[in-house]
Image (cartoon, helix red, strand yellow):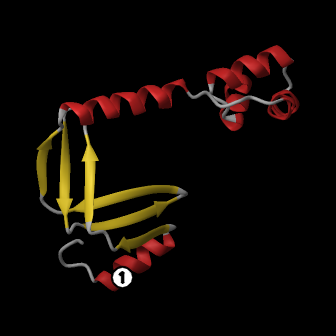
Amino acid sequence: MFPGIDPKMMKQAMKKMGIKEENLDASKVIITLSDRELVFDSPQVSKINMMGQETYQIIGEPVERELSESDENTNNTETAEAEDTTPEINDDDIKTVMELADCSEETARSTLEETKGDIAEAIVKIKRE
């Protein structure tokens, strides 16, 4: 990782800081961009968990591929479908936000809609206002 640092000591230091690293046995990684793909054959992939946030590190030489028109249409359709799907906000979610944020039903409902149903984010947003 770092020149001159003992790998065992580095792992111990990472463990003390709450950083967990796991090597994944990946045979191929494909990153799809809007106009092309980056393809990594036989990459080294590490999953790093730091304070509950997972990060993936990819080491390898990418090969760029242009997207065919049918691939672009598929990606655009998938993106549109993902944007159209709004989670259903139920009465229990609204009651939870009302109780924990001490707000009206209307405020809880509208904030849940703004945060796409994320209860925790809605509560924090209401309390900040």
* Image coordinates for residue 119, horizontal then vertical, percent: 71, 35
* Image coordinates for residue 87, horizontal then vertical, percent: 65, 31
Q: Quadrant of residue 56?
A: bottom left
| Front residue (pair 48, 65) | 65
- Residue 79 against residue 21 in the figure, above or below: above
Name of the residue lying farthest toward the front = 70
- Helix, strand, or loop for circle 1? helix
Quarter containing the N terminus: bottom left
Amino acid type of the residue that numbered disc 1 sits on in the rendered structure:
Met
In the displayed structure, does residue 29 sit left or right of residue 60? right
Residue at 74%, 26% (x, y): give it.
127
| Front residue (pair 23, 2) | 23
Residue at 25%, 36% (x, y): give it.
71
Q: Can residue 69 be seen at all in this image of the molecule?
A: yes
- Residue 64 against residue 13 in the figure, above or below: above
Quarter containing the C terminus: top right
* Image coordinates for residue 7, horizontal then vertical, percent: 30, 82
Residue at image mark 1: 9
- Residue 105 against residue 17 in the figure, above or below: above
Residue at 26%, 31% (x, y): give it.
72
Residue at 12%, 59% (x, y): give it.
61
Q: Can residue 34 be seen at all in this image of the molecule?
A: no
In the displayed structure, does residue 63 sit left or right of residue 6? left
Q: Quadrant of residue 58?
A: bottom left
Number of other residues with Cα within 10 Å of mark 1, as a class: few under 14, some 14 to 19, many 20 or more: few
